[in-house]
Amino acid sequence: MEILINFLYQFIFSIGIIIVFGLLIALCRRGFCSIVGYNGPRILLATGIVGTPIHELSHALFCILFGHKVVEMKLYLPDAPNGTLGYVNHSYNPKNIYHQIGNFFIGIAPILGGSGVLLLLMMWLTPDTFGAVMDTLGGIPTFVDFSSVLDYLGALWEMVTHIFSADNLSIWQWWVFIVLAFMIASHMELSGADIKGGVKGLLILLALLLIADIILYFIDLDALGAVTVAMTSFGAYIVGFLLISAVFSLALLLIALVVRGIMMIFGK
């Protein structure tokens, strides 16, 4: 039982966090497309000029990090017959465990890469807002568990107030950042191919983690606990990192709802 408890904590509050944010971003994206209706593809085609290259470059970067060979890459292909705006084809050795685990991280790469670019753009274009956001992240718990959920929701709201502060409306760099951020956030959703490619890598990663936990349990129970603490503490940084993406994914959905409401009012 001790092994299972530690394993679940390690999974839920590290890898599981990334999966949850991936689902949140996907729901926001699909909700946005549903609300805007037939205008959705046109909007995504326009925002894809920035969002799609970052999406595909994120895949390519993690291909390189995990030893995969990038066979072909299209950063922006608006005229594709199947509607795909870009893609990265890669090859790897299926007998190589490191390569197999890499499939998971290559699959979720757009979430991590997009979040990283958003932070860099914020730091460059709106340093004051970036500083305020970093202060907020510095105040969240450094150990993730179920009791800290409300703390993270509070941090999410505080970040929203910092990013969309009325004081920023007169700063042109902020407007540039907001436009770029929405273009990136609208293309962070994982495709079916991304998810399919990452499932096997995830299962292998979890199997190795469970084996390591079993070994640690019989060698040194304190060491097993230390690994759990380290992984859940690292999860706190992952949450802080991905909260930025959550802000803009939710904001994109909210804007679509507001615009739809205004159109319905004036339509009547």
Image (tube, rainbow, N blue to C red):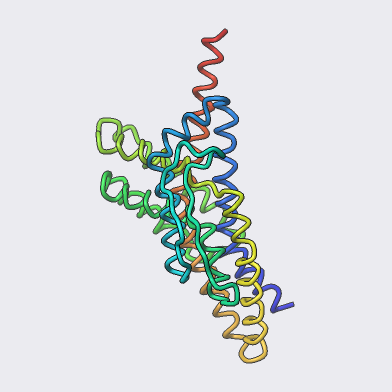
Q: Residue at x 48, y 42 (%)?
A: 85
Which residue appears farthest toward the right when viewing the image?
1
Query: Which one is nearer the viewer's eye here, 110 or 264?
Result: 110
Q: Quadrant of residue 248?
A: top left
Horizontal relation, residue 230 to residue 119: left or right: right
In the picture shown, does residue 36 fall above or below 217?
A: above
Q: How many labels, in total?
A: 0
Q: Quadrant of residue 146?
A: bottom right
Quarter the N terminus occupies:
bottom right
Horizontal relation, residue 227 to residue 244: left or right: right
Horizontal relation, residue 209 to residue 236: left or right: right
In the picture shown, does residue 107 fall above or below 156?
A: below
Horizontal relation, residue 142 to residue 82: left or right: left
Which residue appears farthest toward the top when viewing the image?
268
**Where does residue 27 sit, x and y in percent of width and height?**
60, 42
**Where does residue 140 sit, x and y in percent of width and height?**
46, 58
**Where does residue 12 sit, x and y in percent of width and height?**
62, 63
Quarter the C terminus occupies:
top right
Q: Residue at x 62, y 76 (%)?
A: 209
**Where does residue 26 sit, x and y in percent of width and height?**
57, 44
Query: Which one is nearer the viewer's eye here, 90 or 236?
Result: 90
In the picture shown, does residue 94 fall above or below 77?
A: below
Query: Which one is nearer the viewer's eye here, 109 or 7?
Result: 109
Q: Residue at x 54, y 12 (%)?
A: 265
